[in-house]
Image (cartoon, rainbow, N blue to C red):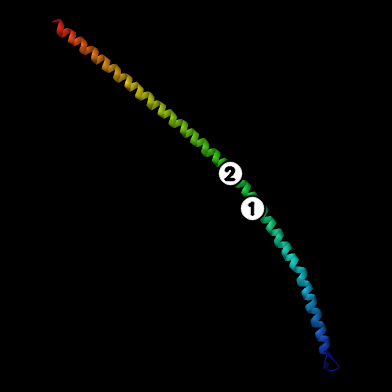
Amino acid sequence: MIIGGKRNTQSVEIYKRKWQSSNRCFGALTAPLWVFQDLQESEVCQEELALKVKQLKAELVLFRGLMSNNHSDLDSKIQEKAMKVDMDICRRIDITARLCDVAQQRNCEDMIQIFQV
């Protein structure tokens, strides 16, 4: 400041100190506001993440249920096919045994005819 043609350095220093002091106070007051805003944003992010985790867990339960149903359906189809194959094998064994019986009976009849002559 200029007073009477001279610069008053003492006044400038006082204003400078006041400005620095108020600037420090302003900085001290705004820092908690930034922290508070960061906390609010992080809470919102945590809530969103928690919701996504719940959704993913529900989807996982559904997926596991579908997979177990598919496996049980597949297992039952495999068991049905295995039973059909077993039945076919048993039927073939029975037919083979019956054919052997018929062949043996025929051989016996042929032998009886041969010896009867």
Q: In front here: 117 or 13?
A: 117
First in sequence, mark 2 or 1: give its number.
1
- Residue found at the far left of this picture: 117
- Residue found at the far right of this picture: 4
User: Callout 2: few (<14), some (14-19), or many (20+) C-alpha neighbours within 10 Å?
Assistant: few
- Residue type, numbered disc 1: Leu
What secondary structure is found at the residue carrying circle 1?
A: helix
Q: Can you tell which mark lies on residue 59?
A: 2
Q: Quadrant of residue 105?
A: top left
- Separation of residues labelled 2 and 1 (CA atoms): 15 Å
User: Which quadrant is the N terminus positioned in?
Assistant: bottom right
Vertical arrangement, residue 82 with respect to residue 117, above or below: below
Residue 40 horizontal/vertical position (percent):
71, 59
- Residue type, numbered disc 2: Glu
- Residue found at the far bottom of this picture: 5
Residue under the image location 65 percent in, 49 percent down: 51
Q: Quadrant of residue 21?
A: bottom right
